[in-house]
Amino acid sequence: MSTSGKVIVITSGKGGVGKTTTSANLGMALASMGKKVVLVDADFGLRNLDLLLGLENRVVYTILDTLSENENDRCRLDQALIKDKRQPNLALLPAAQTRDKSAITPEQMKKVTAELTESYDYVLVDCPAGIEQGFKNAIAGASEAIVVTTPEVSAVRDADRVIGLMEASGLKHPRLILNRLRPQMVEENNMMSVEDVLDILAIKLLGVVPEDEQVIITTNRGEPMVLSATPTQAAQAFLNIARRIEGEEVPFLSLQVPDSGFMGRLKALFRRR
Amino acid sequence: MVFDLLDKLFARGQSNSRQQACDRLKMVLAYDRTADISSEAMNSMRREILQVVKRYFELQDEDLEVGLERSGNTTALIANIPIRRVRRGDHDDQLLATAKKSEEASKTGSDESAKLDKEE
């Protein structure tokens, strides 16, 4: 009997910091490493994981349909799962588009994710923003947590809140992904650095992802950036994070500022004009 | 204008919004992290503290101030409890009783050793 899979929740508190992008890319990266991965979209009413994966046209059943009390409306779990055609190791369990976040209970979430661990190595739950019922549902079945934040005051504040709430629920030792870092701004002392954020949040660092235009472009296309034959720095960061999740020790990317010092500032001056 | 240009060329971390961000966050989190205690919990804690203090002190009135005070990065629980005097109660009686017992014990001990001396 193989060891059953892990349920990892990807959360942040603040919206728009990159949870869904992270979930999509980490899921795809782990699947490319040969692991069986299922992505669970827990953002009821504002689902987006399907869009980021380019699977929005294939959504037929959602997680709610697998729990329907009416036997005629209920479907099997495997009927709701959408298998990615580019990467057969990856599947998506879409969220319902209902606005009613109480349509699912934490117990039901626990049951579904537990069932998924029987056939998947990783069950990645994409948590909605906020700390209300949606958040409570998303963390219900998780044994590990990844906190995504950007180096901005509100994002870090909300991340700290979420870390505290999870600890109170027994979900301890979350790991951090610092997203949308701009090394140039850090150099200019206009953005908090990795060290600053780690000092404040005091949790273990899982990875750092730099700001990257490719995120927008690949989202436009519905193709997670880790699939690219020529991964940009951000894509490489996601790939490295996936390896770290698997237990590998991967050195952090050196996010060097392209032109620093006097010459850099001279060039920047002319660029700004 | 020249100075402006020179300033930009030789920037010595003048726009320290990074430091400001860190400082402001630390302050805000010192508050956030302790703000979560509900008012019911505070009240029940206040009552329990009152009970404990009343065992040792007679109180002025049952007015006590218990609250969280923040100063910079640190938060402290401060209690301000006006007292009238130390209470001489069960606690003290117990101490007296044990004190008496050990006195008697040493007395009988010395009596016995005196007896033994005599017998010898």
Image (cartoon, coloured by chain):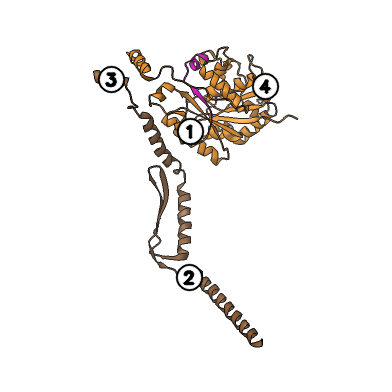
Q: What residue is shown at x 59% (from left), y 24% (from top)?
A: A242
Earlier residue among tags 3 and 2 = 3
Q: Which stretch appears magenta?
A: A204-218
Mark 1 falls on what kind of element? helix
Q: Is residue B35 above or below residue A146?
A: below
**Element carrying mark 4:** helix
Residue B86: which quarter of the image?
bottom left
Q: Tell me which chain the residue with mark 4 is part of.
A: A
**Relative to A130, does residue A253 appear above or below in the rendering?**
above
The residue drawn where x is 58% and y is 40% is A170
Amino acid type of the residue tagged 2 in the rendering:
Gly
Q: Position of residue B45 (x, y in %)?
A: 47, 53
Check contact, mark 2 vs mark 1: CB within 8 A. Answer: no
Label 4 vs label 3: CA separation?
66 Å
> Mark 2 to mark 4: distance in Å?
74 Å
Could you tell me the amino acid type at mark 4?
A: Gln
Which residue was labeled with disc 3?
B6
User: Which is nearer the N-term, disc 4 or disc 1?
Assistant: 4
Residue at image mark 4:
A79
Camera-nearest residue between A69 and A120? A120
Q: Three-letter amino acid code at disc 3?
A: Leu
Q: Spatial distance from mark 3 to mark 2, Cα to Cα?
A: 78 Å
